[in-house]
Amino acid sequence: MFRLLIFFSLLFCSHQITAQSLNYFLEPPKALHNDSAKLELEFNNLNFFKNNEYFNPFYEGYTLPGYFVKAKLHYFPVKSVKLSAGVLAQKYSGVKNFSEFLPIFSFQYNFSPASSLIFGTINNPVFKGFVAPIFDSEKWLTHNNQNGLEYTFHGKNFYSSTWIDWQQFIFQGASYPEKLLFGSSNAYIISPLSKQQAVKFIAQALISHIGGQIDNSTVSVETLANLPVGIDYKYRLGNKKSVQLKAQYITFADLSPTKKQNYILGYGVYSLLSIENRASYFALSHWFGNMFISPVGNPLFESSAEFSNYSEDKRAILAASYLLKKNIHKTIKIGLGADAYFDLYNKNLDYSFGVYADVNLSQILIAQ
């Protein structure tokens, strides 16, 4: 009963209890061209404290206190080419050493003002535009460095980003398998209804693969796919106020030669209503899943538990989110919030809360 009271407080008293959407703190997309810079310094820092109070057979609760820092130099030998090099450092409170200290390097070629190809460290495309059941945005706090290949196109009414994130490379005779994540996110503006209204058709794909031919690993080949399609409607009310409606139908398929998962085929239906203004964001969403699995999604929405063989064919989740946010400066923002997830079948409430501070700085060192 106490958890039910918390959930309905989130729904009807959201200005007293806050919830969060990590999407607000995801790294902003970078412009394809910088006509004014020859050499540019970029600095990104996210500080976070996120506590997950989860009490269910699918996903255990835990706390993430820490920060990460990215520092990069961008060099433009010509206007159509950008070379980037830097480091990523990530640390959790209570741990003496950095959990990650990684090099960053990328080569970006701009075919035109609308399209680009990136080799090396890519622009974390998986964190943009995917809903929670197929991609958990919390990975921004744990695995925010992606490397591989990415192609992006920004048209007037069409956006497309397709990439491969090569997560684990293998040498001949390696004792572990290769791991990669393929993704594609595409959005087409069907027709601008007015300057305030827009409708987008969404078609996406996320495919996780574990395998390889030259390793000595005992792990069998596994390929899991999620394919979402849907509609996104947004109405802008002015003064940075907006209302958004989103609906997606998402399929799951185990394409592995030898099946290890509890399910081979499944699907889910996700719907969301959100209201946003300059100072806050509120969202109410509903999820129904039938034999649904996502290798990189939020485990609370799956039909199969992450660390055990427990499963429930059908899942139904009502979720509420509220974020209190503030732009201290155009380069600095903070937020305080929480999420609540109510399992409609098991009558169980899980919730999380967190506080965040995000800094994104850039400085032209040498002009063109």
Image: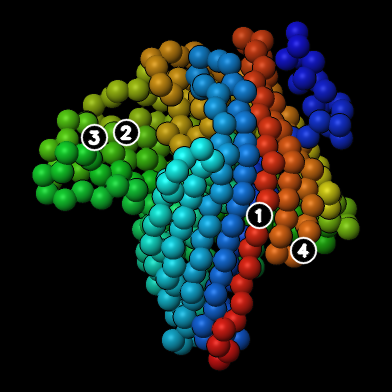
- Could you say whether the residue bearing mark 3 is in a helix, strand or loop? loop
Q: Which mark is residue 258?
A: none
Q: Which residue is mark 4?
A: 329
Mark 3 to mark 1: distance in Å?
Answer: 39 Å
Note whether 31 is above or below 128 in the view shown: below
| Amino acid type indicated by mark 1 | Asp
* Furthest residue in direction front, as rendered: 96
Q: Nearer the viewer, residue 97 or 272?
A: 97
Neighbor class of circle 2 (other Cα within 10 Å; few <14, some 14-19, many 20+) is some
Q: Which residue is mark 3?
A: 221
The image shows residue 278 at horizontal and vertical percentages of 84, 52
Neighbor class of circle 4 (other Cα within 10 Å; few <14, some 14-19, many 20+) is few
Quick check: 289 left or right of 164? Answer: right
Residue plotted at (67% across, 17% down): 349
* Marked residue nearer the N-terminal end (4 or 3): 3
* Marked residue nearer the N-terminal end (1 or 2): 2
The reply to whether callout 2 and callout 4 are in contact (CB within 8 Å) is no
Neighbor class of circle 3 (other Cα within 10 Å; few <14, some 14-19, many 20+) is some
Task: Judge depth for marks 2 and 4 and give the one in front.
Answer: 4
Quick check: 309 left or right of 243? Answer: left
Quick check: 164 left or right of 360? Answer: left
Q: Which residue is mark 1?
A: 358
Residue plotted at (66% across, 29% down): 352
- Could you say whether the residue bearing mark 4 is in a helix, strand or loop? strand
Note whether 199 is above or below 368 in the view shown: above
